[in-house]
Amino acid sequence: MAKTSDATCGTCADVAPDDELQAEELAVLCKALAHPARVQLLQYLAQQGTCYFGSLADVVGLAPSTTSQHVKVLKEAGLLLGSSEEQRTCYCVNPDRLAVLKRLVKAL
């Protein structure tokens, strides 16, 4: 058996509560991106700027009801914003939340 040391790595010894919150936040964001269709939607909207919902189903090639579920997950994670215009909804990437995702991933 390998002998273990009582010494701990200085960077691993103390996990601050703030770090735990960031880990949870990163997990929520990663879970929102855990399906290829949601990654495609986010990429498309990041490139296009805005898009009406009807066009989003064409982007991922899924039924509108399935696309709606994927959009809902991205909205709940705060990655997408939606605004109603008459009887259509226009979606865009939430740049603040995307910046948080990038910062948290970069800190890994």
Image (cartoon, rainbow, N blue to C red):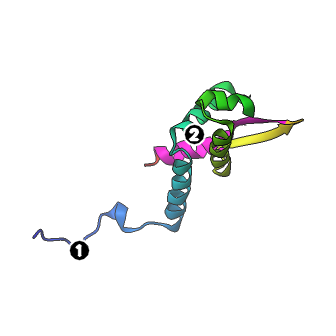
Specify whether 21 is left or right of 66.
Answer: left
Specify whether 98 is left or right of 53.
Answer: left
Furthest residue to the top? 48
Q: Which mark is residue 22?
A: none
Q: Which mark is residue 6?
A: 1
* Viewer-closest of 40 and 62: 62
* Position in image of residue 106 (x %, y %): 47, 43
Queried whether the magenta region covers residue 30, the answer comes back as no
* Position in image of residue 49 (x %, y %): 70, 28
* Viewer-closest of 29 and 5: 29
* Position in image of residue 93 (x %, y %): 67, 37
Q: Residue at x 51, y 48 (%)?
A: 30
State the predominant SS element of the stretch in magenta: helix
Rendered image quadrant of residue 13: bottom left
Circle 2 residue: 38
Furthest residue to the left? 1
Furthest residue to the bottom? 6
Residue 8, compared with residue 77, is above or below; it is below
Dot 1 or dot 2: first in sequence order is 1
Q: Which residues are magenta?
A: 88-106
Label 2: how many residues lie within 10 Å, few (<14), some (14-19) or many (20+)? many
Specify whether 107 is left or right of 92.
Answer: left
* Foreground: disc 1 or disc 2: 2
Queried whether the magenta region covers residue 94, the answer comes back as yes
* Position in image of residue 25 (x %, y %): 56, 56
Q: Residue at x 56, y 33 (%)?
A: 40
Q: Residue at x 63, y 50 (%)?
A: 77
Q: At numbered mark 2, what does the secondary structure look like: helix, strand or loop? A: helix
What amino acid is found at the position of numbered circle 2 in the picture? Arg
Specify whether 76 is left or right of 22.
Answer: right
| Inter-mark Cα distance, 1 to 2 | 44 Å
